[in-house]
């Protein structure tokens, strides 16, 4: 397939792009970053890199991007500033919103204007859609929460769902993605390897997670599986508490995991952004179960072993 990829040069894209190249897809990658890597594929014409910011309207007037939209048979949109890496100042909240909402709105407008719209749009969202809870269990049909992240996810999903009827649309509500070279696990590993790791906050908050390889396999499957439309929760079948996650990570590394990170410390570092890790949600996927999606890493022990080997 001819694929248009937005927001796929970061943590998830480092595994997704090689997977799609291996499957012989032809890729146009839109990224704010300078082109890097994939020299052979770029020379051979299998990968085209457009250094553009998809949240800016002028990017969508560039002829190469307009042509890429018209030629694309599938689109994957993962664009969005990381949620839990900075304090949520007013300017950063605006970045969190514009990087998701504006990018998706301009993309959908371009798809709607295309004489040959793509067959499928796979658009990211997050389990933050459900808000946080210490006791509730959330599935795809559960209602949205009421906090900032829930509102952001709702607006993000609404923008993506406005594609024309000819385009099958799948929203992927992504949990905490596990891989050693980034994300939450990437930040925790150096601390745990020195023996100073432990649960964050009370340890009783839920973590709904997915190994990066399984997330990428789900995206790849969704490109040509007509059963994948609407919304799916991209989470492994076994959510855990933060305390259980910390114990499992300590066992995997052969290190103690007894020193908790107090909530106030994280709040000083991240402000409102701390709520992403201090308040969790127990999320499962009824749809992936009914569709028979096969997880390579369905349990945490195997996922952590793979991610840290």
Image (cartoon, rainbow, N blue to C red):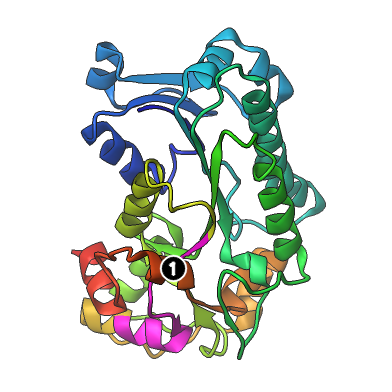
Q: In which quadrant of the rendered view does residue 164 lie?
A: top right
SS category of the residue bearing label 1: loop
Q: Residue 269, can we see it? A: no
* Residue displayed at 47% across by 23% down: 72
Q: Is residue 235 magenta?
A: yes
The foreground one among 282 and 254 is: 282
What residue span does the magenta drawing correspond to?
232-248
Between 167 and 128, which is closer to the camera in this rendering? 167
- On the question of residue 75 being in view, the answer is yes
Q: Which residue is depicted at the point 46% across and 67% down?
A: 287
Residue 121 in the image: state x and y as whole percent: 53, 39
Q: Is residue 148 left or right of residue 26?
A: right
Look at the image and tell me in which quarter the N terminus lies. Answer: top left
Query: At x 30% / y 19%, what residue is drawn?
Result: 46
Query: Percent position (x, y) of residue 97?
Result: 73, 47
Query: Is 202 rendered above or below residue 117?
Result: below
Residue shown at 40% from the left, 41% from the top = 223
State the residue position of label 1.
Answer: 235
């Amino acid at each position: 397939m001819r694929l248009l990829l937005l927001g796929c040069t970061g943590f998830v894209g480092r595994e997704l792009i090689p997977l799609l190249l291996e499957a012989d897809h032809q890729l146009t990658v839109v990224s704010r970053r300078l082109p890097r890597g994939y020299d052979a594929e770029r020379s051979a014409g299998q990968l085209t890199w457009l250094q553009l910011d998809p949240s800016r309207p002028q990017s969508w007037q560039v002829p190469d991007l307009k042509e890429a939209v018209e030629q694309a048979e599938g689109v994957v949109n993962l664009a969005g500033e990381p949620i839990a890496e900075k304090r949520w100042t007013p300017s950063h909240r605006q970045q969190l919103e514009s990087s998701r909402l504006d990018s998706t709105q301009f993309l959908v407008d371009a798809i709607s204007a295309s004489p040959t719209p793509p067959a499928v749009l796979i658009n990211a969202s997050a389990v933050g859609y459900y808000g946080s809870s210490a006791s509730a269990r959330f599935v795809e049909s559960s209602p949205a929460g009421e906090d900032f992240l829930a509102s952001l996810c709702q607006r993000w999903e609404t923008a993506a769902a406005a594609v024309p009827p000819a385009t099958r649309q799948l929203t992927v509500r992504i949990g905490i993605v596990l891989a050693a070279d980034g994300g939450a696990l990437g930040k925790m590993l150096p601390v745990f390897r020195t023996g100073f790791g432990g649960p964050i906050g009370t340890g009783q908050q839920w973590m709904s997670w997915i190994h990066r390889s399984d997330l990428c396999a789900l995206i790849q499957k969704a490109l040509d599986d007509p059963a994948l439309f609407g919304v799916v929760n991209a989470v492994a079948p076994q959510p855990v508490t933060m305390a259980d996650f910390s114990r499992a990570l300590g066992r995997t590394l052969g290190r103690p995991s007894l020193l908790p990170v107090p909530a106030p410390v994280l709040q000083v570092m991240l402000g409102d952004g701390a709520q992403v890790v201090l308040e969790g949600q127990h999320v499962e996927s009824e749809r992936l179960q009914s569709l028979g999606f096969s997880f390579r890493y369905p349990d945490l022990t195997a996922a952590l072993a793979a991610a840290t080997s």
